[in-house]
Amino acid sequence: MVRACIGKASAVAASSGGGKSAAAPRRVLVLGGTGRAGGATATALSDLRPDLSILVAGRNREKGTKLVSKLGERSEFVQLDIHNARRLEAVMESVDLVVHAAGPFQREDKCAVMQAAISTKTGYADVCDGMDYSWRAKSLHEEAKAAGVPALITAGISPGVSNVMAAELVRAAKSENCGEPERLRFFYYIAGTGGAGPTALGTSFLLLGEDVIAYHKGREIKLKPYSGARNIDFGEGIGKKDVYLLNLPEVKSTHKFLGVPTVSARFGSDPFIWNWGMETFANFLPADILRDKNIVLKLTECVDPFIRVIDGIVGECVSMRIDLENSNGHNTMGLFTHNSLSVGLCSSCICSSNSRRQH
């Protein structure tokens, strides 16, 4: 789901300087290229930059070979497990940029791909949506900077585009003398899995095993996952949808870097049975099960055929609404909606921002 977003990451983990080449990258490695996010990324890069040589990496040779045949002669497939450090570094030695889309990122105890990128002096971008993983990656800032490796963290849609929207709302509010930003709320809606497939479902299940980190007047608080339901209007074509608290990285990053004292994030889906199921899992499944990545991924595999059927019925629409409240009562709202998540985002969508004064 990176599409044209590679230059629009929500956080820069390392500044430029050095690296393999000062020129634009010519050979790009896409990890997780046989999945929905990685496959969409490889396709978008091929469309946007026909001059690139794209190395599609994944564990499924059949899927990878099929994708490469569509991308053209400048692309090739390599069978790769990102947990094989020696093999990973060997492959990365031959590329200028690696795009890490091999999720889920939850429950990964180290940033193996970013560490390999630093070791091989390879430019790095990821679509991470895990709180712990993203901050672990940020901790490698000085190492990456010393190696001259530019690194873009959480460069997908949410977080990623969502952070850019939030930053623009805050910037606009300050430039228009609207007072200080006081409260920022992220609301997300997707139809089914939004075309993201089993990875999105696995991520959602894993998030149910995490306390929700939010901020209230500058104080960090922990809340129950998939609680605090709100009914939010996502505008024409979608309407009002129920959304629930989840532990998402943009909450912490916008609180810290944009200086907003109160921040939270909520997520919801269609059909309603998904929300009901998520609430049920959060309330009745032991946290230890929801935190076990192997169990969650096996569960995801079991329900994947059912998920695909439902996705075919409800579509792949995705919408993000971000509300900013300011100290003088001037509130702004950003709304981003796309009808088909799997065909890409930034290159074909417009992010609209609506401003209104409330008394």
Image (tube, rainbow, N blue to C red):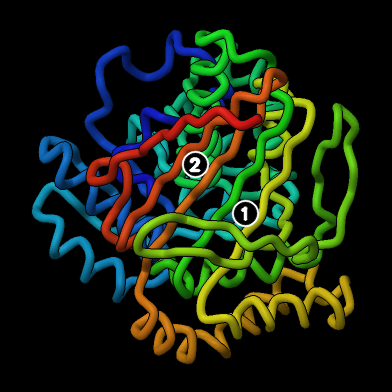
Residue 221 placement (x, y as % from top left)? 90, 43
Residue behind mark 2: 126
Q: Nearer the viewer, residue 303 or 270?
A: 270
Q: Secondary structure at mark 1?
A: loop
Q: Is residue 290 above or below residue 187?
A: below
Judge left or right: residue 122 versus residue 130: left
Q: Amino acid at mark 1?
A: Phe
Lower sequence index among marks 1 and 2:
1
What is the distance, in whole Å, between disc 1 and disc 2 at their CAs? 10 Å
Judge left or right: residue 61 versus residue 356: left
Q: Residues within 10 Å of mark 2 (few under 14, many from 20)?
A: many
Q: Which residue corresponds to the image point at 60% horizontal and 80% vertical from the top-left?
A: 274
Q: Which residue corresponds to the image point at 43% horizontal and 86% vertical from the top-left?
A: 310
Q: Amino acid at mark 2?
A: Asp
Judge left or right: residue 84 versus residue 353: right
The answer to whether marks 1 and 2 mark residues whose Cβ atoms lie closer than 8 Å is: yes
Q: Which residue corresponds to the image point at 57% horizontal and 72% vertical from the top-left?
A: 201
Q: Nearer the viewer, residue 274 or 55?
A: 274
User: Does any portion of residue 136 appear in the rendered image?
Assistant: no
Residue behind mark 1: 105
Residue 186 placement (x, y as % from top left)? 61, 45
Q: Is residue 208 above or below residue 4?
A: below
Quarter holding residue 7: top left
Q: Which residue corresponds to the image point at 16% horizontal and 37% vertical from the top-left?
A: 49
Q: Nearer the viewer, residue 162 or 306?
A: 162
Q: Is residue 339 above or below residue 273?
A: above
Q: Residues within 10 Å of mark 1 (few under 14, many from 20)?
A: many
